[in-house]
Image (spheres, rainbow, N blue to C red):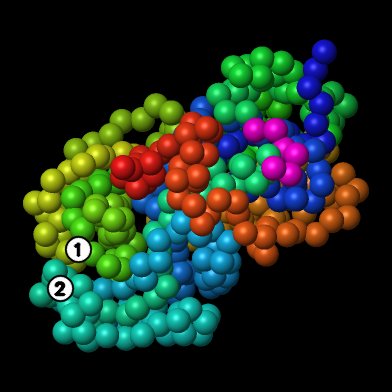
């Protein structure tokens, strides 16, 4: 006896939970499985930045447009999953002024709100900002609490008929006559799931799941370190206004700030070395913008693995140039009822889910519109209820550990 569903979503991060929510709101019977607790992969191990799009504005207009659009939507639907901080892009002495101007001009062309500040005005906003700050511009960045966001998406999916299974690792995939005919799932499911359509939303692990179905999804994951330190006097997110490099983002929470990050290629998203230099470099570079973090007590340190799509990385040739997403229809590879969604950013998870759900609906012959941009997520006006949902789905990640469920 097997479990049946219209759609099986594999992966319980933001994108997978977002896909499950989108499909459930369209009236489709969805089952989601995640090998650990929700957010146990990349989503719960980020620096928790809700991008305004400014980081990508001059190099990737489409990606920046996606970010500002989703930034505005999430502010409307996600409530206490978001902390509205604003953000600054900071030019220090020695940073390229032409880069500052190109980024600011690109933001204005795209429609990302910007306001230019001189060094004194920037230090008035952030009193501990480095004396070497020459100027800055404001953008609508924010902090995002991924544990809450994913739990809210999963809860809404479940409220609309989806089945959510944490701690349910995929063990085997069967393909017959050009279709996935069954997926063997262990852990809390311990059964075979038969679905009309299968979505691979496993992020950095997409290649591993695809290989089980005889498919080739080439990922190029990279690790990055985040360090949370005690510091409760920062208002906006700080971004170093230079080409993306180690230690160029500081994200404020309530009594801590998260410092990030590095980018080091890894072969295996589960087994990789970490290096002390990553921590030291990130702290010292972030301290060039905000000197007090140099000696602030470290609270916790973690690494996350970015789900980078190898063909895109090879084409673009480097870090920070793009974080676009890619929806792979495996009908093109001989498996008619499967798709993989890879790449992207936490900020654009809902848009990634919408594109995926649209492809699934096309494959199933379902005519139903997306409602996720208009419908508010559940419990987002009640942080305690959100945190109960996080606990229920075993969805606590290190990114927002100081906020979620805090006394």
Q: Which residue is mark 2?
A: 127
Q: Position of residue 55 (x, y in %)?
A: 41, 67
- CA gap between label 2 and label 1 equals 9 Å
Q: Residue at x 13, y 46 (%)?
A: 297
- Along the horizontal axis of the image, is 266 left or right of 338? left
Between 225 and 236, which is closer to the camera in this rendering? 236
161 falls in the magenta region: yes
Q: Position of residue 44 (x, y in %)?
A: 44, 42
Q: Are marks 2 and 1 in contact (CB under 8 Å)?
A: yes
The segment highlighted magenta reads 159-164
Dot 2: what SS?
Answer: loop
Q: Which residue is mark 1?
A: 233
Q: Position of residue 198 (x, y in %)?
A: 74, 35
Mark 1: few, some, or many residues within 10 Å (few <14, many ≥20)? some
Q: Residue at x 27, y 67 (%)?
A: 235
Q: Residue at x 65, y 33 (%)?
A: 164
Mark 2: few, some, or many residues within 10 Å (few <14, many ≥20)? some
């Amino acid at each position: 006896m097997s479990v049946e569903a219209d759609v099986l979503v594999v992966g319980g991060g933001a994108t997978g939970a977002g896909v499950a929510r989108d499909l459930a709101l369209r009236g489709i019977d969805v089952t989601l499985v995640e090998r650990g607790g929700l957010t146990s992969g990349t989503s719960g191990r980020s620096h928790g930045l809700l991008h305004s799009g400014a980081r990508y504005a001059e190099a990737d207009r489409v990606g920046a447009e996606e970010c500002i659009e989703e930034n505005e939507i999430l502010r409307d639907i996600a409530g206490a999953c978001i902390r509205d901080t604003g953000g600054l892009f900071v030019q220090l002495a020695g940073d390229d002024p032409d880069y500052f101007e190109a980024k600011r001009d690109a933001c204005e062309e795209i429609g990302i709100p910007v306001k230019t500040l001189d060094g004194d005005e920037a230090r008035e906003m952030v009193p501990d900002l480095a004396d070497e700050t020459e100027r800055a511009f404001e953008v609508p960045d924010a902090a995002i609490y991924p544990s809450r966001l994913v739990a809210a998406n999963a809860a809404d999916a479940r409220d609309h008929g989806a089945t959510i299974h944490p701690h349910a690792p995929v063990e085997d995939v069967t393909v017959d006559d050009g279709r996935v005919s069954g997926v063997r799932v262990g852990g809390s499911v311990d059964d075979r799931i038969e679905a009309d359509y299968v979505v691979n939303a496993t992020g950095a692990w997409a290649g591993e799941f695809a290989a089980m179905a005889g498919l080739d999804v080439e990922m190029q994951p990279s690790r990055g370190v985040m360090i949370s330190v005690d510091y409760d006097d920062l208002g906006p997110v700080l971004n170093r206004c230079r080409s993306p490099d180690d230690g160029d983002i500081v994200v404020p929470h309530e009594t801590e700030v998260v410092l990030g990050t590095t980018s080091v290629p890894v072969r295996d998203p589960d087994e990789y070395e970490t290096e002390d230099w990553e921590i030291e470099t990130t702290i010292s570079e972030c301290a060039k913008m905000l000197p007090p973090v140099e000696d602030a007590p470290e609270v916790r340190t973690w690494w996350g693995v970015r789900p980078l799509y190898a063909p895109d990385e090879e084409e673009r040739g480097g870090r920070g140039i793009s974080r676009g997403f890619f929806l792979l229809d495996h009908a093109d590879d001989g498996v008619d009822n499967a798709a993989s969604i890879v790449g992207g950013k936490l900020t654009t998870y809902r848009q990634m889910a919408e594109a995926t759900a649209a492809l699934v609906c096309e494959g199933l012959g379902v005519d139903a519109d997306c409602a996720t941009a208009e419908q508010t997520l559940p419990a987002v006006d009640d942080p305690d209820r959100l945190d109960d949902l996080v606990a229920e789905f075993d969805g606590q990640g290190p990114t927002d550990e100081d906020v979620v469920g805090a006394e």
